[in-house]
Amino acid sequence: MTPPTATLQRASEAGPEPRPSTGRAGTAAAVDPHTSPLPAGSPHPRRVRAIDGLRGVAVAAVVLYHLFPSLVPGGYLGVDVFFVISGFVITASLVHQRRVEGGPGLVRFWVRRAQRLLPALLTLLLTVAAAAALVGPVVSGRLREQVLSALTFTSNWFQASAEFSYFDHTDPPLLQHLWSLAVEEQFYLVWPLLLAVFLVAVRRPRTRVLVVLGAAAASAGAMAWFHTPGQDPSRLYFGTDTHGFGLLLGAAAALAVPLLTSTPRTTRVAAAQRSLTHPVVPVAAALGVLLAMARLRDGLDLTYRGGIATVALATALLLVGLVVRRGGPVRAVLVARPVVWLGERSYGVYLWHWPVLVLLRGAFPDSSGMLRGALTIYVTLAAASLSWRYVERPILRHGFRGAARRAWRVVRADLLPRGTVLVAGVAVLGLLAVQGLRDAPDRGQVESLVSAGQDALAASGAALDDDAATQPEPDQPPPPALADASPAEIGAQTVVIGDSVTLAAAPGLVAELPGVGVDAAVGRQLAEAPALVTALREAGRLRPYLVVALGTNGDISSQDLTAVVAAMGEGHRLVLVTAHGDRPWMPEVNRKLEAFVTAHPWVGLARWDQTAGQVTDFASDGIHPGEQGGGVFARTVVESLRTLP
């Protein structure tokens, strides 16, 4: 997520094209709004302050999603809003640059991108590595790999290959959020080259728009096609190929704006112009984006089968409206000074908020989520403001060399005390950063616990394997009670569906319940459970007793619980496991579980939130149990199974 520079931040032209010349036949020569030269001294396209405001709204949504996901369950869509803005502004700038200079100007473009992105990023990486040295290994798992992928703008592919889950909120990488910066930077590297060829190879302006729209549709279609219900969608979310449609939709919108503001040549074109530039379009688009941020949870199949793409399309239409329709209620909100202020610093806010949150969790694991969230916002805004004032803006104004010369003059002219403090501070920061990178463990603490659990499942044969499919079992009468059954008898009749907490507790489960079947995955949410249960039942692997432990990664709904019951069919009993940890949605999750069990007396409730007080070896997040805690988790489940009516 990267806002362009002050120069690149301007939108494409909305004014009239130069008058076409006339040939001997008296007909006007066609003017290509993407390649025709502009008159000497043509001003740069006007700056659209509402786009800055839209960035402010987007970054606020992302930050709130990470801090209080139950408050803004669709706040992650702010990243997609940024993608569309970046595609729009970058394409508009490249087109204008070509028309003024007669060429693509790729070197200048890439230099400006480096000036915009690298200084703030390098400052962040240096500071975060130093802070990791102070907080310790609880936050610095695989930090060397994360920093390397950040510097090479491959964070998205690194996280996908390492099987990190974007939707596991319990132990995420310290630099996880840089996946979106990697996607954008890959676009910045490739798109200018493609656009330079594209503008020459495709002669008709409208065809160019349609081709780019087709490419966006292919990317969105790939996300929808390869999404599998019940499986973690992180690879589709991280992938440039499956999540690049927002950038392409922004590019298509930028190519379309000059066509929408030119004199229509046919009645059909005029009708299209009137429809796309109608005053209601930006209002409807803005409301649609806000509604999605409020309701479109990341665990829904709809999210990946057109939901994210629809939000990106609405954002593209909103941008067109903001550029073409200069007034309106949406613009009035977006140009408010606080919103624009936040939008101008949105790159720094995005860079800093996530590491600050993870570092505070590691340093103060027992602090309340509300207090930690408020402190994260305060530190983030302070860091982003300092970055904007002392790092980003000076380099944008004066370039690398000019900013370096000005900084050296300050140090030399005021060697004591400010110069000495500055040099000493940078030196200490550098030494701490080296130590943080050197001491970073190859695995995070939770990752180690999850890996141990996976090994235990594999060794015991408890992991449910797709190759073990049998014939679907018919509906049967309810199974006998387990009050007097042995642990082995209980395990043989039980399947546990869970997330990373279940994986961490797996050694305890296989020890306490020999023969139990376990289907668990990092980042899993309850919305995925109905499809999982259906698949197990159709494959004949759903046993008489089902345990569902899926409240760690987000809020739940009673509809999903009802769907789980329906998916089980007759002849099966259900136990739900409460959530434990310091996450804002967990009290509400447990309240909904209690209400559901009250309404369905034949459903059991395993109170993990209560027995977790007996655990002595939680990871630093206070959520994932070690070997001793895994035994407590398993005994909590067994007790609930034994007391089922």
Image (cartoon, rainbow, N blue to C red):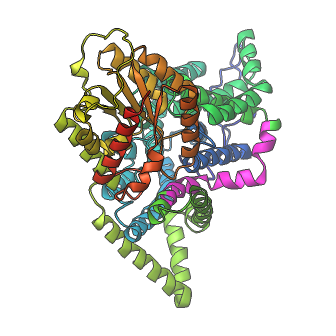
Q: Left or right: 67 with respect to 506?
A: right
**Going by the image, does 440 lie left or right of 3?**
left
Q: Quadrant of residue 100?
A: top right
The one of 89 and 329 positioned closer to us in this rendering: 329
Work out whether 89 lies above or below 545: below
Q: Position of residue 331 (x, y in %)?
A: 78, 40
Q: Is residue 124 visible?
A: yes
Q: Is residue 562 above or below residue 403?
A: above
Percent position (x, y) of residue 520? 34, 34
User: Quarter of the image holding residue 637?
Assistant: top left
Residue 621 belongs to the span the image colors magenta: no
Boundaries of the magenta span: 330-357
Depth check: give the residue in front, 97 or 369: 369
* Magenta residue check for 353: yes
Compare residues 161 and 632 and report the one nearer the observer: 632
**Can the viewer see residue 249 in this picture?**
no
| Above-or-below relation of 82 to 135 | above
- Identify the residue at horizontal 53%, vertical 91% (top origin): 416
Report the predominant secondary structure element of the magenta stretch.
helix
Asked whether, in this view, residue 361 is left or right of residue 616, the answer is right
Residue 560 drawn at (x, y percent): 52, 26
Question: What residue occupies the far front of the structure in this picture?
Answer: 484
Quarter of the picture containing the C terminus is top left
Residue at the limit of the structure toward the left, as seen here: 459
Residue closest to the eye, 277 or 492: 492
Residue 348, percent across and down?
Answer: 56, 57
From the viewer's perspective, tell me whether residue 493 is left or right of residue 346: left
Q: How many marks?
A: 0
Residue under the point 74% across and 54% down: 338
